[in-house]
Amino acid sequence: MSRSPCLRLSRCLGRPAGRHGRTLLATLAAALAAAAPTVRADGSSGAPAADRPDGLADFVPVQPAVPHRTFNLSAYGAIGDGHTPATAAFQRAIAAVAQAGGGRLVVPAGTYLTGPLDLCSRIDLHLAAGATLLFSPRFADYDAGGGHYRPLLQATHCEDVVISGAGTINGHGDAWWPEAHRFKAEANARHLRSNTSPRPRMVVFEHCRRVRVEGVTLTYAPVFNLVPIDCEDVTIDGITIFNPADAPNTDGIDPSVSRRVLITRCRIDTGDDCIAVKAGGRDGGLTADILITDCAFLHGHGCSIGSETYSGLRGMAVRHCTFEGTEIGIRLKSDRTRGGLVEDVTYSDLTMKNVGEAIVISSYYQGSTTDIGAGGPSDQPVAVTATTPHWRAIRIHDIVATGCTKDAGMILGLPEMPADHLRLDRVRIDAPRGLRLAYVHDITLRDVVVHAARGRPLLTNGTVSGLVQLP
């Protein structure tokens, strides 16, 4: 019986408010007790640095403060029969919460057909068990002009915003997806740069402080499901996101240009990135202090960074997560038109089963890389610009990936900007083909085992420098 090639390389390296100040997760409790975070007078996180291998301390974002007042949607004329429009009732109820200075708006069991909604500060939109917000399938309801659409549910320039409960937000995405598929096919046939049709994002928080989303289910999003943009102190705890595996561009959670974000205990099964942390701030805002822990990822493109990274990302950790059937596990992606510096990122204690590729770090997003090392276009350096991707200080440790369906993965920098200071420690990958490296400088592989059914387990060429392999 023949044995597949095996690479063995080695080991190296709040502010709590009433009902929302509850414990986040049992798995973090011990660490939080040992390194209890503080909240400074300016509202920023003051978590002490922890002695962790990933360098990012455990922290709890500052929690929303919502007054103990209760409003019931039914009192404002809403009928939860799935047919009677409830938009005006929601608007009246939200206005009443705002006028009172905040409170909990309870949506009782039932299906409420609604158009777009805007939340206010100091609100807890609480969806009771059996409650569904069913957004209208009429495109015109979300038309913002110029071929753009506004989000289905949004909060802008707000503070202390919560969405909670055991209910569901349904974006009626099946009304939008056929056109999205048609648009994508036509764009690909014409070799256009973008193949994503305009659609409204489902839940968006923009320029908000102290946000919490917990318990709810998000499903059938027209496009991205949950998007915090330029937000601080965001907690996303125990939510479920489900979209069919072929639902186009239905990213699960996409924090962008945000700081102090905790995503924990979520289950995401969708048609694009399960999570995509972005740094695409037009005004240069940094994405920083992102902690993703104890999540389960099913269909989707994995736990990603990018593709927009041009405003910079620093300090992100992904821990104690599982991947099953995802296209990719660890994914960092960008290209020369949308890149920037991404540094101090750690993926650790991850289990992957039947993923396509375990690890993908690429500065050639949506571009061909088959000619790397052969003197083709991919090997030609260009001038470094403000949008050149740069991956630095990336750590990947304690990873087990079994049954990969494509290959172990790839780490690809650029001729003009290699990925640098990378460390893989205690990694096990079983895949049809090995791990490919190109344009990488200073990479240490310790206690790494890649079983490749075909070919060499580690694929390198003359573009890799500073490679340290230890048994």
Image (cartoon, rainbow, N blue to C red):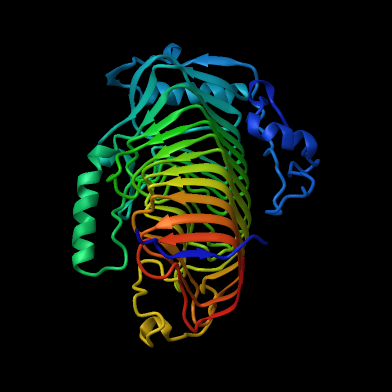
Residue in view at x 42 percent, y 12 percent: 74
Query: Looking at the picture, how far across and down is residue 453, in whole percent?
Result: 36, 61
Residue 434 screen position, x and y as percent: 42, 65
Of residues 425 and 454, the one drawn nearer to the viewer in this rendering: 454
Please state, as top left, top right, bottom left or bottom right, where the N terminus lies in the image: bottom left
Identity of the residue drawn at 56% across and 30% down: 162
Tell whether 299 sits left or right of 287.
left
**Quarter occupied by residue 470:** bottom right
Q: Give the percent coordinates (x, y) of residue 404.
A: 38, 53
Question: Is 439 rendered above or below residue 36?
Answer: below
Above or below, comparing residue 470 to residue 152 in the picture: below
375 lies left or right of 321: left
Please identify the quarter of the rendering in which residue 456 is found. bottom left
Q: Please give the name of the residue rendered at 77% of the width and 49% of the height, measured from the top-left corner.
A: 51
Left or right of 35 on screen, residue 412 = left
On screen, residue 376 versus residue 162, left or right, reads left
Q: Position of residue 100 (x, y in %)?
A: 60, 21
The residue positioned farthest toward the top in the image shown: 75
Please say whether residue 5 is visible from this viewpoint. Answer: yes
Q: Quadrant of residue 87?
A: top left
Q: Nearer the viewer, residue 7 or 439?
A: 7
